[in-house]
Amino acid sequence: MPLEGWDHVELWVGNAKQAAYFYEQAFGFTRTAYAGPETGVRDRASYVVEQGEIRLILSSGLRRDSAVGEFSCIHGDGVKDISLRVPDAREAYRQAVQRGARGIAEPHWAEDEFGRVELASIATYGEVIHTFVNRGDYAGPYLPGYRSTVPCSSSSRRGSITLRAPRDTASR
C-alpha cells in the first residue's frame, strides 16, 4: 500500500474559530481555508491552518445533535482523523480491510468546481479514524466544501475571514 505522506490531522474542538486563532497566534500557522454555513456546510465550522508541510483542520459542531459537538463534550478537544495521502484511496482501503482494518467510509469521490478528491476511511483506536486521500484530480484550497481564506488587513476586524470566489474552471 503506497503512502505518499501525511495529508492532515483533524481535531474536533469546542470552538474552531478560537482554536484556529490560537494556532495562528501561538505557533505561527496560517489560516488557508474554511467550511461552514457560508460555504454550504450546515452542521459544522472547520478552519484549515497550515505551516510548512503541516496541515491541521479544526472543526466544531453547529447543532446540538452534532457528532463533532458530542465528541468534544465527551473528550474535550482532540484528534478525530489522521489522514494519509495516497495515489489510490480505493486500493488503500481494499488492502487495509483485507489486512483486518474495519471500514468506516467506503471509497467515494467528493467533487466541486475545483475537481474531485477520492476519500475512504478506516477505524483505528477509540474514535480516531484514518482517511485515505487521493488529491490527484483536485486543484482547490483543501477539499470540496471549503473556500480559500485571505488574512484580514490590520484595519479590518480581527479574527474575521474573507471568502475568495472559486476560480473559473471552464478554461481547464
Image: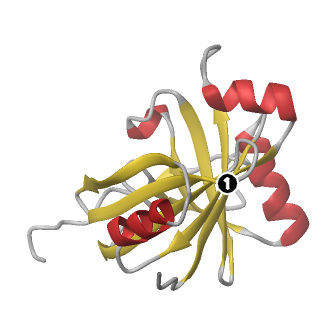
Q: Residue placed at 79% from the left, 63% from the top?
A: 24
Q: Left or right: where does residue 67 sit relative to residue 98? A: right
List the single residue furthest toward the left: 170
Q: Left or right: where does residue 71 sit relative to residue 142? A: right
Q: Nearer the viewer, residue 86 or 44?
A: 86
Q: Residue placed at 83% from the left, 27% from the top?
A: 74
Q: Left or right: where does residue 106 sit relative to residue 25? A: left
Q: Position of residue 145 (x, y in %)?
A: 39, 48
Q: Is residue 52 visible?
A: yes
- Name the residue that disc number 1 marks: 124
Q: Residue placed at 41% from the left, 40% from the top?
A: 39
Q: Quadrant of residue 75?
A: top right
Q: Nearer the viewer, residue 165 or 130?
A: 130
Q: Residue placed at 74% from the left, 31% from the top?
A: 71
Name the element at disc 1: loop
Amino acid tagged 1: Thr
Q: Position of residue 107 (x, y in %)?
A: 34, 55
List the single residue furthest toward the top: 64
Q: Position of residue 59 (x, y in %)?
A: 65, 43
Figure check: 116 above or below 159: below
